[in-house]
Image (tube, rainbow, N blue to C red):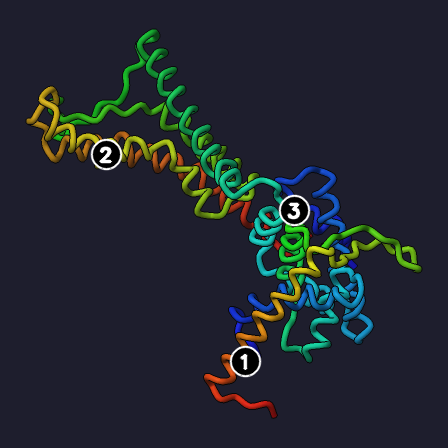
Amino acid sequence: MPDWDEFVRERLIGISLEPRERSEVAAELADHLEETFEQLRRQGLPEEAAVERALSQVKNWQSLRRRIQVARSKENIMTNRVRQWWLPGFVALFLSVMLLMVNEFIGIRFGIKPLIVSAHGSQMSAPVAVIYVPWLLLLVPIGALAAYLAWRAGGSQGAMLLSILFPVLPHLAFFIVVFPVALVLDDHVAHNVTVSGLFMGLIAWVLLPGIALLGGGLPTQVFSSRRATSPSA
Amino acid sequence: MIAPGIKRGTAELAVLSVLEDRPLHGYEMARRIEQQTQGALRFTLASLYPLLYRLEKRGWVRGAWETSGTGRSRRCYRLTPQGKKKLSPIRKEWDELFRALRRLTKVKHA
């Protein structure tokens, strides 16, 4: 017979409840599983089948954890949203911006140049994409951190994905909303910007950072989801 | 078999009704509901506890740890005065709904 208490405690890791409350919930759910198991055994089911039937009551532990958290939370849904994606997202954005500044500062001080890719191949003429490789590499753990923070707060898969990609959303908004509007309304913005220039900007500031963030965030998301739903103790 | 959407709506009524008779712990509550509805309503761990915690947050039920004769510690739920007050209008609403559906679909008692 499994250690039901230990089994449930492992599945409730990351639930945002006070330690005493979390412990009570775990004890209560473990008690329910144990009683189901004992009843099935009394009905003559072999141990393995009884364990399987008892565990089949919960298809998705992550979803149960989230629903319990919402049901028991004394705070409102807005606070949960803040914890599940605003906070992880802004932490990731802040770190991303700070590390970009550090990257630029160190680059200037020590003469490390960013990678410059031109739309015209080897001819280094505008438009060009300025790619900060060290910064891109540092975005990998930032993506992982954002996914972890969202998961710990009981965030859904969508909330985790949003938190991971949060640092590139301002860049995306700039390219698809702010920049075209500024192009039309602001006389100071050069009007000879080409489609290839916008494309290069999107690659350097949205696509590549997005891939780097997902590179760290998605494995964390997959790992934490598996950990939350795994049937084995 | 009753469709999941309808079941969701009746879940609160089922829990409050079964607690009206006597305080129960989660597992016993699920068993009683299943027995009394002849298997039409079934609560699993995943469907019961979020609902119980929600009802507790609203102040309709109150849970407290109690030790049984066998020394086993369980969290028993009882209906609060506020929950008792809520049960009556919920029953009335569902009764009205079922009567309206009966009239509409001309479903007759067997």
Distance from disc 1 to disc 3, alpha carbons, whole Å, reads 43 Å
Q: Are marks 1 and 2 on the same chain?
A: no
Chain containing the residue with disc 2: A
Q: Is residue A141 left or right of residue A66?
A: left
Q: Which mark is residue B99?
A: 1
Which of the 4 image quarters holds residue A120? Answer: top left
Q: Which mark is residue A12?
A: 3
Callout 2 crowding tier (Cα within 10 Å): few <14, some 14–19, many ≥20: some
Amino acid found under the numbered disc labelled 1:
Arg
Q: Which mark is residue A202?
A: 2
> Residue A220: image x %, image y %?
50, 41
> Residue A111: image x %, image y %?
30, 9
Taking the image as drawn, is residue B94 in sight? yes
> Residue A205: image x %, image y %?
28, 30
Amino acid found under the numbered disc labelled 3:
Leu
Asked if B74 appears above or below A140 in the picture, the reply is below
Write the residue at 77% across / 71% down: A40
Q: Are marks 1 and 2 in contact (CB under 8 Å)?
A: no
A174 and B33: which one is in front?
A: B33
Picture quarter with the N terminus of chain A: bottom right
A102 and B47: which one is in front?
A: B47
Write the residue at 63% across / 59% down: B46
Amino acid found under the numbered disc labelled 2:
Leu
Please, what secondary structure does the residue beneath circle 1 have? helix
Which of the 4 image quarters holds residue A50? Answer: bottom right
